[in-house]
Image (cartoon, rainbow, N blue to C red):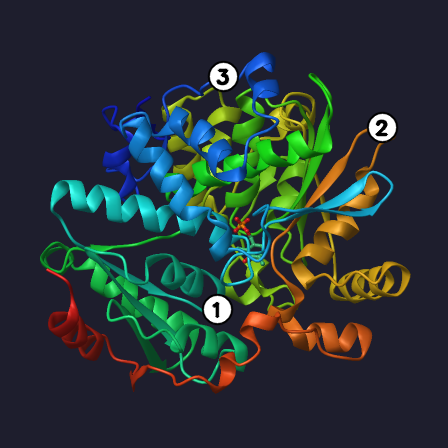
Amino acid sequence: MNYVSTRGGMAPQAFSDILLEGLAPDGGLAVPQELPRIDAATLESWRGLAYADLAFEVLSRFASDIPPEDLRRLTHAAYRPASFKSAEIVPVKPIDGAMALLGLSEGPTLAFKDMAMQFLGQVFEYVLGKRGATLNILGATSGDTGSAAEYALRGKKGVAVFMLSPYGRMSAFQRAQMYSLQDENIHNIAVHGVFDQAQDIVKALAGDLDFKRRMRLGAVNSINWARIAAQVVYYFWGWLRATSGPGQQVSFTVPSGNFGNILSGHIARGMGLPVRRLVLATNENNVLEEFFRTGIYSPRGPEQTYATSSPSMDISRASNFERFIYDLVGRDGHRVKALWAEMARTGRFDLTAERSRLESEFGFVAGESSHEDRLGTIRTLFESRGLLIDPHTADGVKVAARFVEPGIPMLVLETALPAKFSETIQQAIGRPAPVPADLAGLESLPQRVEVMDCDAKLVRDFLEKHAKL
Ligand SMILES: *Cc1c(COP(=O)(O)O)cnc(C)c1O
C-alpha cells in the first residue's frame, strides 16, 4: 500500500514516510493509491474481535510497511482498557428505535480525537525509534486537539510537545486537563492573546524552514493520514455491533468541522463496508452542509465564522475536504489542483454538475443545527430518557432524526462527553454535567504552564532551550 498526493505531484510513498509529514510537497494531501477492499466473508470473520484486534486488522491494510507483530503491539497499547472509561473501548448506547450513539469519547480527554491520537502516539514513538530520530510537535489549541495530543504523546520517547494556548481563555476544566500534566516532554505555553495569535506564532515558526529543520518541528493536525486511518476502525466496529449478518446496511451521522471524522466513514464505505448514508451535521457554520445541498463550496472568512455552543465545529474551511473531492472527480489530481486554484482566485468552486452523485454514488446527505436545536435536543433526551449528551453530539442527533429510515440502524457519532461543555449543559437542563469519577479532583492538581507574552521570539527561544534534538 502506497500513498500519492491529491494534486498528483508526489511519487508513491509508504505509510511510515507520510506519517511524519504535513502537506504533500505539491500542497496536496496524501491518499492511498488504491483502497483496500474488505469482502463480506472477511467482515463476518471480524465479528468476535476486541477493539484492539479489529484496529490491527483494519490498520494493517494501510500500514503495510510495519511488520504485523509490531503493529498488533501498537494497537493493543493504544486501545487498552486502562486508557478508556469503557472496557469495550467504543460502547454503543441505544437512544430509541433505530437510533444509537457510537461512544467515541471514553478516552482520556473525553472527546473522539483520542481515538486517533492514542494510536498516533504509539506509531510516532515506534517509527521515530526505528529511525533513531526525534520530533518536536508544535501546535496551538483552543481546547480539544491540544489536550488529545498531549495525552497521547506524554512520556513517549523521541518526541516532545509544545502546545500554545490563549491565556485565560479556556475553561477551568480544559486548563486543568492540559496543565496538570507533569511529563517532562509536555510543554504548555500560555500566551497573552487569543487563539488566532497563538496560531500565527506557530505558522511563523513552522514557516521558517531553517528553524523548522533545525528544531525538527512537526505537527499532529487533522490532515495526518494516520489519524484518518485510525478513525476508519470505529465505522467497522459500529457496523459490526449494529448488524447481525452480511450485507445489512447502517447509516452514520457525524457532527462535522474539518471533515476528518466523516472522511473516515467515506473511506470505510469505499473499502466495502455496507454503509447506506453518511449524514453530515453542521452547526451554524454550514459551509459543508451548503456544499452537499448545492454542490458549491464557498469557505467563509473569519468575520463570517461564528462562535457557537458547539465550538469544535466552528470552522471556516474544512482541511480534509480535498480528499473527498479527489474521489468525487475520479481521482484526477490535475482537476483537484485546478479547483483549488479556482478557489484561491474566486473564493469558491462550483461542482453543481456533480451534485446528484453526492448522494446516489457516495451516500452523503447533510443538515444544519442551531443553538436552540442543540439546547432542545439535550433537554428532550435528558427528560425523556435520562441520557445526557454534549452539544456537538446534539447537533448530530438533531440532524440524524431527519434521515432515519425503517429497518436501517442509525449510529450517531458521540464526539465528546457533556462534562467538557458544562456551560451549555447548564443552560439546557438547569444544572451542570456530572464529571467522570476519575477526573473529579482534576482542577485541584498542581499545574505546569509557561506564561509568556504573545511574541514569536519568546516561543522561539523556549524551543531552542527545550526541544528534543
Ligand atoms: C474535532 C471535533 C469535531 C469535528 O470533527 P472533524 O473531524 O473536524 O469534522 C466535532 N466534535 C468535537 C467534540 C470535536 O472535538
Residue 180 location in percent, x, y?
40, 78
What kind of residue is marked 2?
A: Gly
Relative image position of residue 212 (x, y in whole percent)? 16, 57
Residue 37 — which label? 3
Q: Mark 3 to mark 1: distance in Å?
A: 36 Å
Question: What is the quadrant of the N terminus in the image?
Answer: top left
Gap between marks 3 and 2 measured at Cα = 26 Å
Looking at the image, is 446 positioned above or below residue 276?
Answer: below
Residue identifier under label 1: 143
Q: Residues within 10 Å of mark 1 (few under 14, many from 20)?
A: many
Q: Quadrant of the C terminus?
A: bottom left
Of circles 3 and 1, the one toward us is 3
Local SS, label 1: loop
Residue closer to the observer: 158 or 395: 158
Can residue 37 be seen here? The reply is yes
Q: Which mark is residue 111?
A: none
Determine the secondary structure under disc 3: loop
Q: Real-space Cα distance between discs 1 and 2?
A: 38 Å
Determine which residue is flagged by label 2: 407
